Image: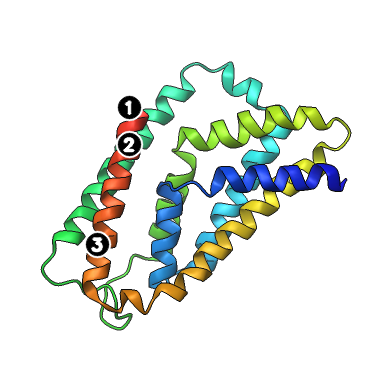
Amino acid sequence: MTTAFLPGFLLSFGLIVAIGAQNAFVLRQGLRQEYVFAICLTCAVSDAILIGAGVAGFGLAVNALPWLEPAMRYGGALFLFVYAARSLRSALRARHDSLTPSTRQTAGLAATLAACLAFTWLNPHVYLDTVVLLGSISSQYEGAKVAFALGAMSASFVFFFTLGYGARLLRPLFANPRAWRVLDALVAVAMFGIGLKLLL
């Protein structure tokens, strides 16, 4: 079992750790200390569902629906462009008041979770990494697919909760409003770049 669990964990962790829209969103929520547990749990459980589907063989079903990939690609790109515009507008604001919980205006839990789900489920790369890639590699562990899947799922939980709650270590840096403006600008560039990559 261990021989399948560890490869599943390492492979999944390596795929998740790459900078992406979802990770940037989790980092920002962690810095703001808003709905961190709910966001981390949503990301990890979503990954677990997709990994389970991939190991169960649903990658073949995804490949059998040729319309699904472009639909997700264009929908995901549109969502990323809109989020990039919002981040850029926030970065260009003369006054940045997102640091003080008592004064900043925050999105509600439902709206925040909706954005989190969009970052996860509208990203075609998530399906390629979890359903298709991990699902295909799991076939090498015949008789130990469950251990492989559990390892891959565990990596998601470890990564997202570490990112979400570890972000608070950077809060002293973000006591400076200028740091938030730089972060918003970087997020805007990253979101726009990822959206453009989806289209191209």
Cβ–Cβ under 8 Å for marks 1 and 2:
yes
Residue under label 3: 182
Q: Earlier in the sequence, mark 1 or mark 3?
A: 3
Quadrant of the image containing the C terminus: top left
Seen in the image, is 179 located left or right of residue 67?
left
Which residue sits at x=32%, y=74%? 174
* Residue 9 horizontal side relative to residue 166, left or right: right
Count residues near mark 2 (Cα–Cα under 10 Å), then give few for <14, some for 14-19, many for 20+: many
Residue 25 point in image, percent of width and height: 40, 56
Q: Which residue is mark 1?
A: 199
- Taking the view exactly as shown, the residue that stands out farthest to the left is 94
Give the crowd class for mark 1: few <14, some 14-19, many >=20 residues within 10 Å.
Answer: few
Name the spot of residue 162 as percent of width and height, x first.
57, 64
Give the labeled residue for mark 2. 195
Q: Are marks 2 and 3 in contact (CB under 8 Å)?
A: no
Q: Secondary structure at mark 1?
A: helix
Query: Please, is residue 156 above or below residue 176 in the view?
Result: above
**131 to 94, vertically: above or below:** above
Tell me the quarter of the image containing the N terminus: top right
The residue shown at (32%, 42%) is 80
